[in-house]
């Protein structure tokens, strides 16, 4: 077994516009005593990536333009000196020295030639939909949980035998080359990794480069002696389905692309799909007549998996569009509205669920001053049932929805006119704050534990969250309620008892701190507002130029 002291270790960090995290990754890498060199390859970044990396103590080599992750890895490997070289991504928020040590230690201890990682992560779309199906088809013996995990380490002597791709194919290329050369590869679990997810528009490029690498290696290592008609029909059918998806996506979501171009792309995709799926069905039928019937299902799934997945994605997209289609006045309108995935970390009862979207409808008969709002919308707007919303010059009370109308937002005519909404409009949860932005809210405090006092807070709905605070309210030294919201700096907020101002709070950035108390006096009564903690909130307390902040009445 090799001793950890006997080998020098270089850590290569390819980075492209990672100023927020690269210094953290460098600092973590330098914590390991056996690491002799940390190299950051700035792959044409236009932010402060290089500066942050240098400040953290890394040696920085910069590309003049963005050349791709694989090129950055090649540059780093070429300039590194260690007997063992590790490649770590620059965008990992929660990287620790223990995780890096788990990658490198098996090589230092002589247990393997190359290590690759697997970890808990939010997404692996290209892995699941592209890499794994192709690997199962061409390289069934290569069975890793995450072949595109991104973090690698290996002995220099074995890495020199590997061809580093210039793009996203570098990860799977290393795995396949190492397997072909008979090198020992160990997949190590390093736990949870938090890093930036690839945006949707880059997934097509990533999938193409991974596919190209796997197919190239399959050709090079004799896994494909010829691209037969079955494989060609599958590829062309998948291409046709992908073009349909691309065309629909450009029609409904991509700004600046002419409608006609999206339609042409979709029509080409439809023609290709129909033509090649007919040929594929004929060829498949001939093939399965020659095979044992017991293998039909397994073989069908194995060979047609890319087509099946593309067809499922297309069907889901079409069903989404059809569900959002409306026809009126001779016009067909399709307005897809996404649901919002809401995550509450640590919630004891429910941590993940979907909010919205909400469909606008008219108010019920004889309820011209009542807004019926779903509970999810209420939670997003930080309201409570019974709140009064000032819309225009009128107040409207928020009530529960009726049974069976969990996502129906019933608004009186005057409210719809003021908010510029129509019956049938669909509002996503992410946009509902913007719809109600600027609306003033009158909320009655729950003061049931002190029967001789009632209280009301006033605030404004904001379209985005701001830094705010929670205040505990005490009357005569007894806590009666709590309120949460944000204050505007350099504004004054008035506390009323009855119709008179008893306290004006002048706000600046220094006087809203945890533990700060504000006192108001009315006769023999003492009112205390005590800041308990900071929160992120879309509620903005009402400053005195618009009305009262808090109103109390004593019986």
Image: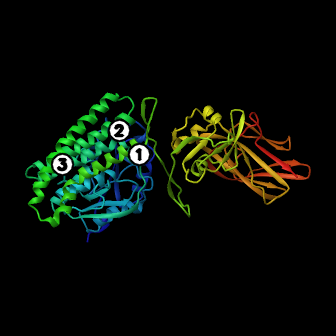
Q: Residues within 10 Å of mark 2 (few under 14, many from 20)?
A: some
Q: CA distance from mark 3 to mark 1?
A: 46 Å
Left or right of residue 180, residue 29 in this image: right
Q: Percent position (x, y) of residue 321?
A: 39, 41
The residue sitting at 27% across, 46% down in the picture is: 207
Mark carried by residue 234 = 3
Q: What is the secondary structure assignment of the residue under circle 2? A: helix
Q: Is residue 540 visible?
A: no
Visual colour scheme: rainbow
Q: Residues within 10 Å of mark 1 (few under 14, many from 20)?
A: many
The residue sitting at 10% across, 59% down in the picture is: 289
Q: Percent position (x, y) of residue 163?
A: 19, 50
> Looking at the image, is mark 2 or mark 1 earlier in the sequence?
1
Mark carried by residue 249 = 2
Left or right of residue 294, residue 470 in this image: right
Q: Residues within 10 Å of mark 3 (few under 14, many from 20)?
A: many
Q: Is residue 187 visible?
A: yes
The residue sitting at 15% across, 59% down in the picture is: 180
Q: Which residue is the site of mark 1?
A: 53
> Looking at the image, is mark 3 or mark 2 earlier in the sequence?
3
Q: Percent position (x, y) of residue 73?
A: 28, 48
Up/down of 181 relative to 249, above or below: below
Tag in front: 3 or 1: 3
Q: CA distance from mark 3 to mark 2?
A: 22 Å
The residue sitting at 72% across, 54% down in the picture is: 482
Quarter of the image that includes the N terminus: bottom left
Q: Quadrant of residue 549?
A: top right
- 426 and 252: which is toward the camera: 426
Given contact means CB atoms under 8 Å apart, are the residues at marks 3 and 1 in contact? no
Left or right of residue 283, residue 498 in this image: right
Q: Quadrant of residue 368?
A: top right
């Amino acid at each position: 077994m090799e001793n950890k002291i006997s080998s020098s270790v270089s850590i290569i960090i390819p980075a492209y516009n990672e100023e927020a995290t690269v210094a953290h990754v460098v600092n973590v890498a330098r914590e390991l005593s056996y690491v002799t060199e940390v190299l950051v390859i700035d792959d044409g970044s236009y932010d402060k990536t290089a500066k942050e990396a240098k400040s953290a103590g890394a040696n920085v080599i910069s590309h003049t333009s963005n050349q791709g992750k694989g090129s950055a890895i090649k540059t780093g490997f070429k300039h590194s000196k260690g007997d063992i070289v590790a490649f770590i991504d620059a965008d990992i928020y929660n990287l620790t020295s223990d995780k890096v040590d788990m990658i490198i230690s098996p090589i230092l201890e002589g247990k393997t030639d190359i290590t690759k990682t697997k970890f808990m992560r939010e997404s692996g779309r290209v892995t699941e939909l592209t890499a794994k199906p192709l690997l199962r088809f061409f390289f069934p013996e290569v069975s890793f949980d995450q072949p595109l995990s991104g973090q690698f380490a290996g002995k220099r002597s074995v890495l020199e035998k590997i061809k580093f791709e210039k793009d996203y194919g570098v990860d799977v290329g290393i795995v396949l080359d190492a397997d072909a050369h008979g090198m020992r590869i160990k997949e190590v679990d390093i736990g949870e990794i938090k890093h930036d997810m690839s945006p949707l528009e880059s997934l097509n490029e990533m999938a193409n480069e991974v596919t190209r690498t796997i197919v190239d290696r399959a050709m090079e290592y004799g896994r494909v002696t010829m691209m037969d008609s079955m494989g060609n029909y599958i590829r062309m059918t998948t291409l046709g389905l992908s073009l349909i998806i691309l065309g629909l996506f450009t029609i409904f979501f991509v700004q600046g692309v002419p409608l006609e171009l999206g339609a042409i792309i979709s029509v080409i995709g439809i023609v290709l799909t129909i033509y090649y799926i007919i040929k594929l069905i004929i060829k498949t039928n001939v093939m399965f007549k020659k095979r044992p019937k017991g293998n039909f299902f397994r073989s069908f799934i194995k060979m047609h998996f890319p087509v099946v997945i593309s067809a499922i994605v297309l069907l889901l997209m079409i069903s989404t569009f059809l569900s959002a289609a409306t026809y009126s006045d001779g016009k067909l309108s399709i307005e897809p509205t996404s649901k919002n995935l809401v995550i509450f970390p640590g919630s004891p009862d429910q941590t993940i669920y979907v909010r919205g979207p909400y469909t606008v409808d008219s108010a019920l008969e004889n309820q011209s001053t009542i807004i019926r709002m779903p509970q999810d919308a209420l939670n997003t707007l930080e309201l409570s049932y019974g709140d009064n919303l000032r819309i225009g010059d009128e107040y409207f009370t928020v009530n529960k929805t009726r049974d069976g109308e969990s996502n129906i937002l019933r608004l009186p005519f005057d409210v719809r006119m003021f908010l510029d909404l129509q019956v049938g409009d669909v509002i996503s949860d992410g946009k509902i704050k913007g719809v109600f932005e600027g609306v003033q809210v009158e909320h009655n405090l729950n003061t049931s534990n002190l029967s001789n006092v009632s209280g009301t807070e006033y605030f404004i709905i904001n379209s985005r969250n701001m830094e705010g605070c929670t205040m505990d309210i005490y009357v005569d030294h007894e806590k009666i309620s709590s309120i949460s919201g944000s204050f505007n700096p350099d504004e004054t907020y008035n506390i009323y008892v009855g119709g008179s101002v008893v306290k004006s709070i002048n706000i600046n950035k220094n006087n809203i701190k945890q533990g700060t108390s504000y006192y108001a006096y009315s006769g023999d009564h003492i009112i205390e507002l005590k800041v308990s903690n900071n929160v992120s909130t879309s509620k903005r307390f009402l400053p005195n130029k618009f009305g009262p902040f808090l109103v109390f009445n004593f019986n």
